[in-house]
Image: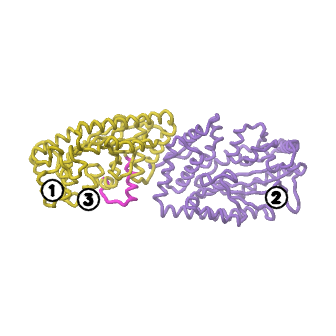
Chain colours: A purple, B yellow
Amino acid sequence: MKWYEEIKNTDGQGVVVSSRVRLARNLARYNFPSHCSEGDARGVIQEIAKVVEESQDLTGKLLRMEEVRQLDKVVMMEKHLISPLFINSHLPGALYVTEDEDLSIMVNEEDHLRIQSMMAGDHLQKALEKADALDSILEEHLMYAFNSQLGYLTSCPTNVGTGMRASYMVHVPALESTGQFQYILEAIGKFGLTVRGIYGESSDALGSMFQISNQVTLGISEQEILDNLSAVTRQIVKQELVVREQLLKEKYSELEDAVFRSYGLMRYARVLTAKEAMTLLSDLKLGIELGVLKTKQAMTMNIYTLMMSIQPASLQKMESRSMSVQERDMARAEYIRKNLPEIIGG
Amino acid sequence: MKWYEEIKNTDGQGVVVSSRVRLARNLARYNFPSHCSEGDARGVIQEIAKVVEESQDLTGKLLRMEEVRQLDKVVMMEKHLISPLFINSHLPGALYVTEDEDLSIMVNEEDHLRIQSMMAGDHLQKALEKADALDSILEEHLMYAFNSQLGYLTSCPTNVGTGMRASYMVHVPALESTGQFQYILEAIGKFGLTVRGIYGESSDALGSMFQISNQVTLGISEQEILDNLSAVTRQIVKQELVVREQLLKEKYSELEDAVFRSYGLMRYARVLTAKEAMTLLSDLKLGIELGVLKTKQAMTMNIYTLMMSIQPASLQKMESRSMSVQERDMARAEYIRKNLPEIIGG
């Protein structure tokens, strides 16, 4: 089972969707990717391939990105397995990935290695443990670029130290719709944290989904980073739940109307852009979690998985054909319709 | 069966919803309503009451407006039986109305008598015949204010002559959505015709429903008025059908999406204003008529009847209680949901 298939729509009221830990590592023997030759890059891949081959503990497979079709690369990006930067890299790259897609390593992205661990729900500690375990296996075979004073050395100075970035994906429709998330966005920098949309730095806040992650990696331990991120996120979750309660108590009629309308549009629309679909699915998630929408049967997949499935590349991959924007919007509407649970009160 | 229950959603592709003829008459022995005393007004009612009582041909009933509750008056207005002016009149008034509501007489509105004949679909000629028949019966018993040169005398000079106003209610969503109805509105005055919304002179164009009627009543025969109105309306109908064909051929995907979305909103919204509901019902009417929406069963009532039923007073009458605006919007959403046919492709 893929890690994201384990996401529950009601997990901790569904606010914390997933936890992710990423470790940046570089091999001491090679120039860092921003300055390395193609030969260096191939050397790095070769080293990783050897470890993957030799180690009993590494059960995933190593994909050479040169052999991966462009569409499949974008699908990987839509699943948060790889970054946009990685797709467009001029260097040869590779991706180590487990069957569950919960553990992965981008080879030759901004750093030689980007170890990533993802888990459904609020399990950052566990995600870190899994990333650390993978890191330890690699370290047995590889010589990392490490400085006893600075810690792990990375291409970008902001990653030096632990080389760790930890993040939560949170779903905060109540805070967003009432405009309160704006204040959180403005304040969060003070805690050494940063907020981005579901698809990276510059992306819009699609479906009220946000990634909250640490900015600082230097002079602070991995555990401190996690504790800080968890504490702040816990506050955000608390606020989201307070506002949800307020909506239920004070604006029930509007809330009910809004989530039912969104459901109705998904049930009947014939054309849906990814952006609109994300908003509607966000409303569905909120409605189900608050008990305003009562489903008649279990969903074919959780809403987060559905959100990823309707992204442009994933949709084309599923349909096994290249589609125009208009064709995608129609296929998306149909796909959502098919995977929408029936609800009581139609 | 009420006359409007006979409206078919597909009648002549549903563009001409109904036909109406109204005759303005005054009794020679009394001052006209704008200048008459309460005693005069009661005298007029008395005369009509006597005719209704004595004539075998008049099977309807005569309601004294003083005895009609305010809510019921507004319901009558929403059904186009009486005018807003009539509700707010300071004079004692009465309403003669048949069981089917197809023939009626407002007593002491702007004129002593406003005879009205309404029919489903494009049947102006028949509506005129029925109004004329009623008029003839009345004329046997009453002395009308009539001038051999001018014709029937009326309170407002624009009604002098035949005293007739004929009108069609048309549903032109395609012309309206493409902005082409605006040109028709501007040109129609040249033909001595005028266009109003479904609820009178100042009302917005709700649900793409418009009344097209003659402005001129003097120096032209009843038949000429009808022929002129019919000819122009036939042109409008033709244009509407041309644009519908264009939408089907050239913008099928957008059209399909739009009508399905409107259906989805009606199926699931919990709060609906009258204005929004009219727009959604208009889309439903268009969708069914074009075969884009395929219903699984016959509708409980035609869409025009549904449009009248969800007006504020009619809704409260049906629920037998006075409701706040918010309560009405919720009751309206529920009522539409209950009366919405199931469609194929949910």
Q: Which residue is mark 3?
A: B88
Where's residue B75, x and y in %?
Answer: 28, 53
Where's residue A299, x and y in %?
Answer: 56, 46
Where's residue B210, x and y in %?
Answer: 35, 45
Q: Secondary structure at mark 3?
A: loop
Q: Amino acid at mark 1?
A: Asn
Q: Nearer the viewer, mark 1 or mark 2?
A: 1
Residue B31 disc label: 1
Please tell me whether the stretch drawn in magenta is mainly helix, strand or loop: helix
Q: Is residue A240 one of those drawn in magenta?
A: no
Q: Secondary structure at mark 2?
A: helix
Characterize the local packing of mark 1: few (<14), some (14-19) or many (20 or more) Cα atoms within 10 angstroms.
some
Q: Tags 1 and 2 in contact by the CB under 8 Å rule?
A: no
Residue at figure coordinates x 65%, y 38% from the top left: A317
Marks 2 and 3, how far apart in space?
Answer: 79 Å
Q: Chain under label 3?
A: B
Marks 1 and 3, how far apart in space?
Answer: 20 Å
Q: Which residues are magenta?
A: B318-338
Instruction: Examine the rendered structure and indicate whether residue A220 appears above or below residue B164.
Output: below
Marks 1 and 2, how far apart in space?
Answer: 96 Å
Q: Which residue is mark 2?
A: A157
First in sequence, mark 1 or 3: give its number: 1
Left/right placement of residue A206 relative to residue B260 reads right
Q: Nearer the viewer, mark 2 or mark 3?
A: 3
Q: Chain under label 1?
A: B
Q: In terms of depth relative to the viewer, which is nearer, B228 or B303?
A: B228
